[in-house]
Amino acid sequence: MIKHKWAEKLIEVPDKVICDICKKEFDAKKDDMEVQEFIYVRNIGGYNSIFGDDEEIYYDICQHCFQKFVEEAEKGE
């Protein structure tokens, strides 16, 4: 989940980014290197999708949780 704040010119600027897996919150300015490494999954379910037609799927995953996911997938777990 990405929390935004509004800049002077009404441009959305990320303020906080929260990992949808571990729920850790990262400050966009203080933790800028961590935020840059987030994995953003965006998808819309198509016809006959198990998620539902036109269902929107959004996941924001920190690099640490994504690394665990990749390592488990490589092990075949």
Image (spheres, rainbow, N blue to C red):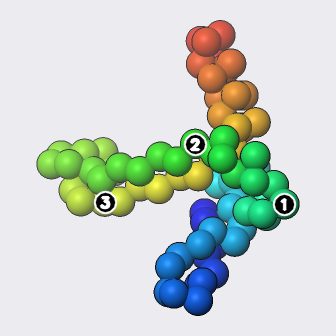
Q: Quick one: quadrant of the N terminus?
A: bottom right
Tell me the residue that label 3 is attached to. Answer: 55
Above or below, 19 against 1 in this view is above
Image coords of residue 26 (percent x, y): 78, 59
Q: Residue furthest right?
A: 30
Q: Give the alpha-carbon distance from disc 3 to disc 1, as whole Å.
A: 34 Å
Q: Are marks 1 and 2 in contact (CB under 8 Å)?
A: no
Q: Quick one: quadrant of the C terminus?
A: top right
**50 sits to left or right of 77:** left
Image coords of residue 75 (percent x, y): 65, 10
Badge 3, how many Cα within 10 Å: few under 14, some, many 20+?
A: some
69, 50: nearer the viewer? 69
Question: Of helix, strand and loop, which one carries label 2?
Answer: strand
Q: State which tag comes first along the sequence, 3 or 1.
A: 1
Q: Which label lies toward us, 2 or 3?
A: 2
Q: State which tag comes first along the sequence, 2 or 3.
A: 2
Question: Of helix, strand and loop, which one carries label 3?
Answer: loop
Residue 45, label in figure: none
Image coords of residue 28 (percent x, y): 73, 62
